Structure formats: C-alpha cells, structure tokens
Image: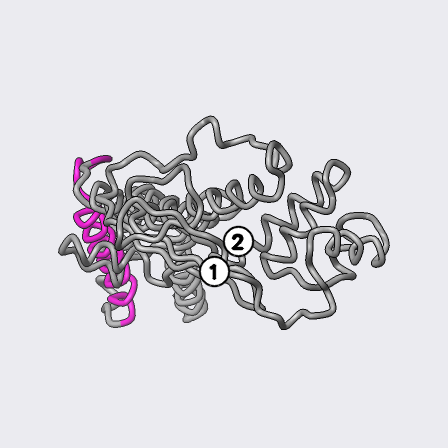
Amino acid sequence: MESQDVRASTLDALRRWAATDRPTLVAACWRAGNRNISELARIAGVGREAIYADLRAKGIEPTRTREEPPTMPTTTGQADIELPVPGWRHPHLVNVRKSRDWRGVRYEFSTKPFTGREPEPELPEEWRNIHPSDGDGERNWERSSQRHTEIGLVRRVWARAHFGYQVGQLLGRRDGHPYSTPAEHWQAFVDARETLRTAYAALDTTLDNMWKSALLRVVDAKGPAQEAAEMWDRRASEFAALDGWLLKQLGEDEYPTHAIRDAAKEHGVDTTDWLIESHYEYTETWTSTPAIAEIEKMITAGDERIRQVSGLAGTGGH
C-alpha cells in the first residue's frame, strides 16, 4: 500500500510541475516504480523520446527495466531503527525500512499504539508546500514524497484508534428523550416495534365482538413505535457518520467490514443486531431513515390488511 502511495504522488508531481524540472520528476517517477514510458510521456505532455532522454540525463537506462536499482543510503539515530530519509518524523513512527528492487520503492513501518485521544497527525507547516524541485531537486522530491507517505500511514493508524475511542464515547453518551444511552434507545425501539407487531398479529385471532378493542391497541402502539424509531435513527446516524469518516480515512481497501461492531465489542457492547446503515441513508436521502422506514412499512402492510378484512365484513350482510 505504501509503495503505491509513492508511485501515485510522483505521478501527481510530474503532472503538476513538469514544466519546471521535468527530468528530475521523471526520474523520481521511474525510481518509484512507474515504468510505463507512454504513461509518463502522456502525463508530462511530451513525446516518448523526451522521456527516454530525461531518464538517461539522470543516469537511468530505461531499456534495462529489470535491473535492480542501487539501495539508497540511510541515516539513523539509533542502531535498531533504520530511517532512510533524514528530517521530520512523527513521534509514533518508530521504525521505517526502505528498499528498492526492479518494482520500485518498498516500505515497512512500525508505530507506537495510539490511544485515539491524540489530535490528527499533521506534517509540520514548513513541509506542507515544498516544491519538489526546490534545492536539490531529486533528493528534495524524495524526502517530500516519503514524508507524505509516512504521514499517510500514521494517520491511518491513528484513524483506527480514534474511531475506537469515539465509538466508546458514543456508547456511553446519554442523549435524547428519554435521556438514555444508545443501547437503551435501541432496546426501546425493539420493544415498541414488537408491541406494534404483536398488536397487528392479534387481529387475526380476535373475535368479532372484540375487534374494536384490538384496533385501539394498534392505534395506541403506532405513536410510540414511530417515536422510538425516530430516536433510534438519531442515535444510529451518529455511528453511521463515524463509520463514514473511517471509510474516508482508510479507503475501501483497508476499511474493516464490521468496524462499528468490532469497536463496540472492545467496549463490552454487542451491536450485532443494531439497525445502523450507511451514513448516506441518514444524510442524502429523500425517503425515510432506516428505522422509521421499517415502522412505516409495518404500518402500511398492517393497515392494508385491516382495510381488506373490514371490506369483507362489510359485504357479509351487516
């Protein structure tokens, strides 16, 4: 994953700054593993021959694509930590190992654990907008590229920890009416939904002289079920928003399928049965939110059956 980040970032730099120092940027792309001459030419806006010339100007023979590039020099402040590019390091990044082969740059990382309470890791201000051709162009680009690769890795590690911490905060927070935890609101919704379902189901076995009383139980169950559904959707939307944030931070390849359930389990709460859908279902929809939609569907089906039965009774000779 990390080598792919470097490859993409070198291509992006070539696309943006090819007019300033194309040979340096082309060489950086090549050394990061981007070996498609036609693609490099297209991105740089030049012909293939220009790319060949750029590479040779930087001591690279492009026809020998499977030759193993030389290992870059490393610097380290501790004997057991290899830090191949000097300069900025996030305090949670304790080990970075870098190697090259004919496929490009490869990284291995080790980090100290986050609690999730830390602020989001950021590059120092002085490193945010450095032009890759400033100073020692190729070397400066490599430093800048690796720093962005490292901060990306650290942010993903932090994001997982921050997500787990925030899930714990949501699980313990009391809110709404009644003033309850999410687990209590979920149980209230389950109970109200079951009361409504039972009221509709009871109509099938109710004697004719008790029909009106049974209908009143249905009417009485509708309001609480709708209120409980609305309250649950409010709480569920908080978890869904947090889940959407994690997906954005990690990307689809690294996003865990059951992120909320797994994080909640760490806090001793089983959310397996909780109705929590994608955050889009709560924010970008012109229909009802999930729990409300479930209750509305139950009411629509139940009331339709009541109308059908009432119609049959009405034609029965009353």
User: Which residue of the protein is positioned furthest toward the top in this rendering?
Assistant: 125
Amino acid at circle 2: Asp
Q: Circle 1: is it few (<14), some (14-19), or many (20+) Cα within 10 Å?
A: few
Determine whether label 2 and label 1 are within 8 Å by CB.
Answer: yes
- Magenta-span inclusion, residue 257: no
Q: Residue at x 50, y 60 (%)?
A: 71
The stretch in magenta equals 175-204
Q: How is the image coloured?
A: one colour
* Residue denoted by label 1: 1
From the top left corner, tell me how far across and down residue 3 is, in percent: 51, 58
Residue designated by label 2: 5
Q: What's the residue type where badge 1 is placed?
A: Met
Which of the numbered marks, if any, corresponds to residue 181? none
Q: Position of residue 66 (x, y in %)?
A: 63, 72
**Main secondary-structure element of the magenta-colored stretch:** helix
Q: Nearer the viewer, residue 289 or 217?
A: 289
Locate residue 114, reporting x and y percent: 24, 45
In the picture, measured across the screen, residue 172 lies left or right of residue 82, that is left
